[in-house]
Every structure is written in structure tokens, then in C-alpha cells.
Amino acid sequence: MTASSLLPAFAVFSLLTSSLSRAQDPPAPLSLERLRELRHEAAHRRRGIIANNDGCDCLYFPKDQVLTGAAFLDRRTTALAGTQVAALAYCSISSGFSHFTHNTQVGTVLTRSGADYGILPNTRNVAQELIDQGADCLQLVTDYGHRNGMEVFWSMRMNDTHDVAHRPSKPYLLYPPLKVEHPEWLVGDPVKRTRNGRWSSVNYAVREVRDLAHSYIEEVCRNYDVDGVELDFFRHMCYFPSTARGGQASDVERAQMTELMRRIRRTTETVGCTRGRPIMIAIRVADSVGYNRDLGLDVETWLAEGLVDLLITTCYFRLNPWSYSVELGHRYDVPVYPCLSDSRVRGGTRFHRGSTKSYRGRAMNVWASGADGIHLFNYFDPKRPLWKEIGDPKTLSREDKLYFVTVRDGRPSQFLANGAEHRNTGPALVPGKPVVMSPKHAIELDIEVGDDLAALREEPLPPTAVCHVEVPRIQSPERLAVWVNGRLLEGATVEDTWLDWPVPLACLERGANRVRIELRKDPSPEPAPWSLVYTGSTMPAKPWKPDPGSVRTSATLEGGALTIADRGDISGDYLYYRFPWGADFSDVVVVETQVRVISGSSYLILADSTSGERIGFHPDHIDLFHDRKIRYDMDTTDDIHTYRIVVDGGDLTISVDGHPCLAAPQAFPAKRNYSRNEICFGATNSGGLGEAEWHAVQARVDTVSCRDLVLSLTFPKP
């Protein structure tokens, strides 16, 4: 019995067709000049969609399924044939730097299974099984892609740190032997966490790390018939200790990364000339020259020196409009593929950013920017209709769409201190980060619409446009006024927590559309009801959220009150309950609390995102935390007292049991650092002690929190 007879039929076919084509048609070597001409032509080939696959089809294959090459490809690849996918970018894991699921001799083949670490127990890692069958995951995808007219890029995550969960006492699936053997090559360790990025990132200032990165790429270029390599710098963005510690990369560090890119280019050209076909280089980076530069990635120099063939931008967050990336790449004659990755925004109630309609809207915005195509990341169902829609604006033109103000809300500062300073897009709006409006402060937000609205208006069956605003606490539609590009909308209807306004197509534009939302004064002469009410009969429920506290803090229900105690004076010894109340101190805010002090100090904290103050309750007086001269002497322990706090245009007054006692004009200067908009009550701070009975906390704020803003386009079906 021959070795090939032991292989599944599909694997035998793959190996035979690959080897026969090479044997029958030996490639003619190319001159460097001709190689560069062909590479330029290849780079500018039209690709509707580049589909990135993170390799989890190999790492988490069904545990009890018979493994064949066809079964593996069916997980994520087979159904993409005949769609608008022109290129596959296959990542053979590369998570943990040096771990791979292709047949590597330079790195380490990842043979562990997630089930052994409590991860997806009904799956198994089939990397070694495929290698033993004669065609590994990368080879199978490459052969299949080429047989079906699709290019194939090998995607290497240049510093993936999904292995950050590793601990010496509790090893993790993805943590590679390399990092165990060379902890000195990392930017941190499990104990000394880094300020930015992740501790398990390898340090590219170490020559051995750069040499290995180059060797991994060279090995794939020599051993696999790939059309290019995709260098994914976004997963994850930490390359030097300088940025991990909260600083910026130095000129020396940037030069080290640029020299690595030059080495990779020279290698792809050497191998390409020998095999008679170019190997392209694609990079996936942040959409800001300055942000990348501060990280140590001198992307503009790479483009200027011709080290990059395809520019792919964004992932967790966007810093600029798509047109920024397009202009940057085209300035250097490099095609641009904006990346649409999974949203990860939580809290959606009616419209969802991961829906087909949302992806259509995002894709249409990409096409409207002049981009050359779309890079789709973390989107793995090969049977979804999107693969046949978003790769061409013509097929998208009459499909229903959703447009959001913000689709991804990741923090640029996660990887780079002060990274948000590079952001040039408008205010973010997602359900978890609502925008507060009051009668004195309207909100203005932009929604990008990629459809050619001028053309749609002329069609016999134009779409219907609706502006959807989520405002959970609004009492009636009449209290809100919405303008789109200066035109007042009329005819709102209510659906659950949403208000819907029909939008005339005539007032919409292709590109940015400015939406202004105003909260009108409540015309009712009757006092508005309390916006929030808490009584000590039960524990505070959502959206109240407690601090972690410590073993020396407690919150217990006793006699119709919540007794909050802080009996420790070290770091972490404090406990507050917090409520995101959406206050605006330039307007009127009223708070009443019923509390009896037992001992020490307790506080009521009021904040509106721009400023704040703490009202202190002590056994013999009350005062203001930021101005201790403003105090009122009284016995706070003898009874349950009612404290009424009124903020009016920034002025603060306090009454006790109906008697005025404190006044603090302009008590909320903007220079105070209160970034949250919340009301809090609880016990003291880390260095103090305190205990009090909280019988009630209630507040009245004339504001509305806008949780989401969506524009829908719905096309009539003929």
C-alpha cells in the first residue's frame, strides 16, 4: 500500500493537481523589472471582497466529524466559490507569535486542542491531522482558491495576543513554547501588566523577534503557492515596550520596523522572480498616519518606498473617514481596502450593527469613498447573502440598508496612550455610551449615507427613508424636534423606546448628513415626576451598579434602609452605588435623599460629565468636598433627615428637612475631572471610614439620553 493510498481522495487530488501543474509547466524566472510590472498589475486587479479567515475552522473542527479536505473546506470556504469574493486571506492561527496550524519548520505547529483547556469541548484541533494526511489547512485553501479563480493571501498576525490569558500556574491553549523559553522577549509579564497593549506581546526591538517574523513569512513564500502575504498589524497593536508603558515609539524603533518591511519585500521579490510570479504584500493597520507612526509603524514611508501593494485599514475603531485611507493609498498608487469587522457594540434593542442591512450600509459607504474593494474580517458564514452583494455597488444599489452614527466603538487608547487625539470623526453614539440632551443643549451628529441619493430620487420606485431615534425616557414625541440637514422632520410615530420620523429624500445627501435633535421644555405646569427613585426596601437594581468594594466594605438591608459601611482604610476600601442619570447642570436638577449617618463620612456624588461635586455627610455637619468652607453644622446621627439638593444653572443649594442651609453659586467648574454622568451614594473613600443608613435617593433631571440614531433606507419591491 502506498502512502498516497492512505490519504482522503480530496487530499490526493489536491496534491496531484498541484504537483502535476508544477511538473508540466515549470515556471520561467522573471527579471526584477518584469516582476514589478506584473505585481503592479496584480495589485490593481479588481477585487470586490477580500475574505479574511482567522483559521478557527482548523483549530475548532467538530470533535466527532470525519476529517477530509472537503469537510474542512466546507466549514468556511467552499460556498465562497462563485460569490463576489476575489481573494481569500487565510490566517493559520499565528496567535501567540510562532504558533501556526500550517506545516511549519521554523515556527511551532499548534497541536493543542481547546477542549483540553475547557474551550469549546465539542471541537478538536485538526492541524496535525491535516498535515499527516498530506495537505495542511493553508495548502487546502490555496489550492481550492486557485481552482475557483480566487487569489489566496497568507495572513500573519504580527503580534496577536489572544494568549494573554496564560499564567505559569494555569497554561493557556495559545501560549507558545517560544514565550516560555524567552520571557525576556516580551514587553511585560503576567504580574507586571502593561499600561497599553498586552503584556504577552513580543518586543520587536529585539533582533531575534524581527528575524523570526521575517523567517515565518519567508518559509510560507517558499513553500506555498500564495499570491501574497497579509501582514496584520492591527491584531494586536503593541510592538515595543515604549508604547506598552504609555509612551510613543522612537525613531530607532520605527526604523527597525521599516527595515523589517524592506527585508520582507526583498524576500518576496527574490522568491517571486524564481517562481515566475509575484508575491504581493498587504498590510492591515490603523487609519491614521500619526497613530501608526506613534506605535512604531511608519506606514507612509512604507507606501512611499513601494513596500506595500494593498492597504487595509481599521478594525476595533475608526479614526478618520474612509476617504482619508483612500486618499493616502492612492497618493502612492496603492489600492485601498477598508476593513469591515464585527461590530461588538452591545445593547442594541431594535436595530443591530451585525445585521445584513447594517453591513450593506457600511459597504455602500466604503464604495462611496472611492475605495478599491472591501476587506471582510471576522465574518465567517459562507452562506450569508452578503458575499454576493457587498462586493459591487451595483448589486447593493437597491438593497435595504441601515446607517448608524457609530458602528465600532473600540478605544484607541487601549493600544496607544492619548490615541484618541488622532480621532477626526464626530462624536460616537452607541447604546452603552448615550449622548445627553437638555432643553439648553441640543445634540448634533453625522450619519454617513453611501447611496447615490440624487439618482435614487429620479427612479420610479425610490426608497423610503426613516430616521430612528432611541430615547427611553421621553414622555411624548412632541418634546423632541429633529432636523436633517436643516429641515425639520414631522409625523413621528412611537415604537417601544424609539421615535421614527419619515425623511424626505430631497433633504438627504450622499456623504455626511447632519442630524440635530432638540429637547423642548415640558409645557405642563405640574412638577415632572422623579426621573429615578430608589428606596431602601430592596437592593439597588439595574441600572444602579455597585463598586467592587472589598472585604472591609458591606451593603445590607436593615429596617427599610440600605446600610453602606466602609470599615477599612486601604486602597479599594470604598463602596458606592452608581446610576447613569443623564444630568445637565446648566439646567435644573433636583435630588432628594433620606439618610441617617452612623459614623465617619458618607457622600452623595453628583456629576454631569463636565464637572461634579460631593455632598459630605458627617456626624456633626454636612459640607462640600471641593469647598470645605461651605458647611452646615448639625447632628446627622439623631434621626433620618431629608436633604434636598437643587442645581440651577450651576448654582447649588441644599435644604435640610425643608429649611435652607447651604448655598454655593457656580459650584460646578468645568476644570474638575468628572468624566461620567452619574449620581452615586455610598461610603467615603479608600483612606477614610464611614457608615450610614440610606432610606431613599430620588432625582429629577429634565434631560433625555439618546441611546442610538439610525437611518433606514427601504426599497419597494416591484
Image (cartoon, grey):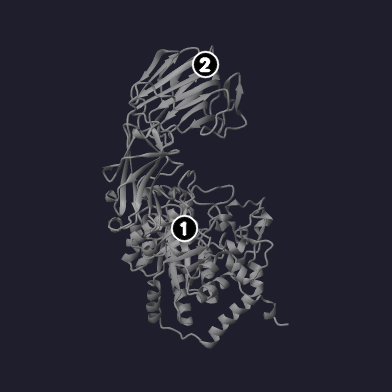
Q: Quadrant of the N terminus?
A: bottom right
Q: Name which residue lies at 44% across and 31% down.
A: 581
Q: Nearer the viewer, residue 652 or 273?
A: 652
Q: Is residue 223 left or right of residue 341?
A: right
Tag 2 residue: 619
Amino acid type at circle 1 is: Phe
Q: Which mark is residue 234?
A: 1
Furthest-right residue in this view:
1
| Residue 489 visible from this viewpoint | yes
Q: Earlier in the sequence, mark 2 or mark 1?
A: 1
Element under label 1?
loop
Q: Residues within 10 Å of mark 1 (few under 14, many from 20)?
A: many
Relative height, residue 179 to residue 169 (above, below): below
The residue lying toward the viewer, choosing from 365 and 587, is 365
Tell me the quarter of the picture where residue 582 sits: top left
User: Disc 2 versus disc 1: distance between alpha carbons?
Assistant: 54 Å
Residue 63 vs 641, above or below: the answer is below
Instruction: Assess disc 2: are there few (<14), some (14-19) or many (≥20) residues with their C-alpha within 10 Å of its C-alpha.
Output: many
Q: Find residue 375 and report its image quarter.
A: bottom left
Q: Is residue 317 above or below residue 337?
A: above
Q: Mark 2 falls on what kind of element?
A: loop
Look at the picture and state if 638 lies above or below 354: above
